Image (spheres, helix red, strand yellow):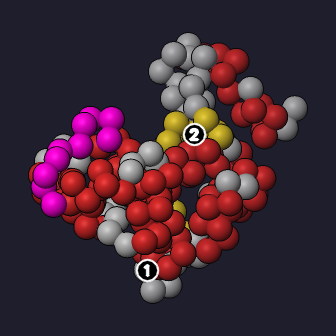
Amino acid sequence: MTAREEWGEFSKYHAQGIPGAEALAAELDRIIRDTGIRSPIDTRRGLHARLHYLDSPAYRTALKNAGVRPATLRRWQTGKATPSRKSRQRIEKAYRTLRSHNMLRSGALTKRLNRAGAGTRVEIYPVNQTAVRPPHRRDVQQRSLQIRDWHDIVSAWDARDTARLDAAWDDIITDLGSEYDAYAYVSGV
């Protein structure tokens, strides 16, 4: 049995983890989610900032697609009405979708991750082995490495191409040396 196959059965002894490519995708989702407007949507400042960001024909179309009528949007923008909790969720969804689209289209996410050729340091957390009995535990340490070129990774993530993202993850962990297969499945990135 190869190391890759052995780690493919990491849950045999109750270790917990996910494929590394999936963890990488979740981290990119988090980066997109955590950038942009910081104020929560349920505050006046957060709501107005999102409505201002969404104030263009393309964005109004996105709000309409999210179920917000133009007249309702105008009342919110002028302060004549306050959106319900469900409507705020729709505004947040439209904002997040368009913010993500804009960051990808402009290349801002890739530029941020590449940081003028220096790249971004990534910490890789191995599978969680707390439920594994001691004789079956493997000594796998948290690792970190610098990823200098994010173009293919972001492109695969944006396309939701799991095969390309998995191939990119394999390329990343190969740089970890002889124990790289132990990082095919991780608890997080």
Tell me the kind of residue under disc 2: Val
The part of the chain drawn in magenta is 78-87
Queried whether the magenta region covers residue 6, the answer comes back as no
Residue 119 visible in the displayed image: no
Q: Position of residue 11 (x, y in %)?
A: 66, 22
Asked if residue 117 lies left or right of residue 156, the reply is: left
Q: Residue at x 21, y 53 (%)?
A: 76
Q: Which residue bears the numbered disc 1?
A: 115
Q: Residue at x 59, y 66 (%)?
A: 154
* Most distant residue in the bottom direction: 116
Asked if residue 59 lies left or right of residue 186, the reply is: left
Q: Which residue bears the numbered disc 2?
A: 186
> Vertically, is 51 above or below 147?
above
* Most distant residue in the right direction: 1
Q: Quadrant of residue 84?
A: top left
Does the CB distance between marks 1 and 2 fall below 8 Å?
no
Tell me the kind of residue under disc 1: Arg
